[in-house]
Image (cartoon, helix red, strand yellow):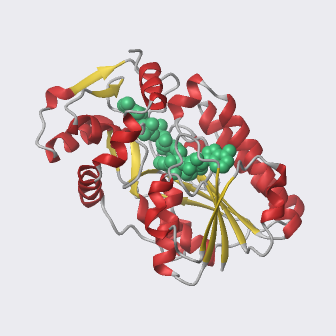
Amino acid sequence: MNIVVTGGAGFIGSNFIKYIFKRYPEYKILNIDKLTYAGNLENLKEIEKNPNYKFLKKDICNKDLEEFLDGYDVIINFAAESHVDRAIYGPEEFLKTDIFGTFNLLEIAKKKNIKFIQISTDEVYGSIEEGSFDENSPLNPSNPYSSSKASADLITISYFKTYKVPTNIIRSCNNYGPNQYPEKFIPLMITNAIENKKLPIYGDGLYRREWIYVIDNCKAIDLVLHKGKEGEIYNVSSEFSIPNIEIAKKILNLLGKDESLIEFVKDRPGHDRRYSIKCEKIKKLGWHIETDFEKGIELTVKWYIENKNWWRIIKESPQFITHYKKTYNL
Ligand code: NAD
Ligand code: TDX
């Protein structure tokens, strides 16, 4: 199979490319990534010389992308601006990449008659106090990130209905694992704890997410790629949720650090209280969780201990420092 992965230098995309080459060494992958602050070719070091792998540094919004995409079977669109806090202080890039970029790729998929898989998120359903959303629940996003992703989902659905572009949408819960940029909650908590810095917890710390180890999500994407029914949406979740404050305590405990490092800080505007999704459809395709949270968080903490150079370079960059000061009002 010839696959175009967009955003393959980011967290989930790079884990997916490495996973695919392990499972299907004969597949060919073209990775298209603009290399924003979140894109890092270090994530792909172990496969960069693989003759079946190609990299193209491009923006998914570029109209000329089409000339590079002959002979591919599928586009899997991971490329996005992905951090909610950045969307709050700078929404424009989110609308450009997450909405217009998806539209641009759909146009190419339509012209070249190739399958299109949109990597979406549970955040498009918005917050739910009790119970869980399924794939037919209405979209009710709360912030410029999730509303951009919801818009992209709607455009994707319209390309299936109107032009019969074979599409799938995958809406997963919060991912964690190796190579996640340390602005996100779990890697920020781990790396701050290692450095004996304060762990900033928004509001009362009782916000809840469902957490999935990234490789389990890669396996779900693999299943949809091979067995997904055209036009279908698939939720993907561990169905395991835990309040943020409990995650911070667990991480401190694993690292042998004191809970006095926890610091409650000003809440995120529009902060969704709880996400929860049902994923019967993906289970019917034969998917199940393989790495539970206890195991996954241990593996993740271990990875950040063993890869300090990877995240220290990021955290010491002017780009990260500016973001940190803006987000935490320092
Ligand atoms: P990430 O921020 O780590 O990576 C995004 C990648 O996209 C980077 O390599 C970046 O350089 C690239 N990119 C950004 N704008 C681009 C553009 N205009 N053109 C080309 N490349 C561009 O994100 P992630 O956490 O790996 O998320 C990947 C996808 O999964 C996103 O679409 C996100 O919305 C979705 N998602 C993420 C999570 C999560 O918990 N991380 C959960 C559900 C869904
Ligand atoms: O410093 C922090 N303190 C804190 O309490 C940060 C960065 C986060 N939080 C809280 C906010 C959320 O309740 O932790 C929770 C998780 O935060 P993020 O890691 O920023 O994730 P979230 O906002 O839930 O969005 C993520 O999951 C869905 C990804 O960033 C999205 O790309 C994905 O679509």
Q: Quadrant of the C terminus?
A: top left
* Res 95 → quadrant: top right
Residue at the far bottom: name it.
Answer: 26
Which corner quadrant of the image does residue 161 belong to? Answer: bottom right
Residue 310, image x, y percentages: 36, 48
Question: In front here: 166 or 181?
Answer: 181
Question: 158 left or right of 315?
Answer: right
Front residue of 52/220: it is 52
Residue farthest front in this picture: 49
Relative image position of residue 133 (x, y in whole percent): 54, 50
* Image position of 218 with respect to 300: above or below: below
Who's the residue at 12% across and 33% down the image? Answer: 258
For the N terminus, the quadrant is: bottom right
Could you tell me how many numbered marks the image carries? 0
Residue 117 vs residue 156: left or right? Answer: left
Q: What is the x, y in percent for residue 154?
A: 75, 48
**Image point (54%, 48%), residue name:** 39
Residue 103, above or below 18: above
Q: Is residue 146 left or right of residue 44?
A: right
Q: Is residue 159 visible?
A: no
State the image quarter where residue 257 is shown: top left
Identify which residue, 326 or 250, lies in the foreground: 326
Query: In the current view of this chain or complex, which residue is farthest to the top?
Result: 330
Is residue 73 in view? yes
Name the residue located 25 percent from the left edge and 39 percent from the top edge: 246
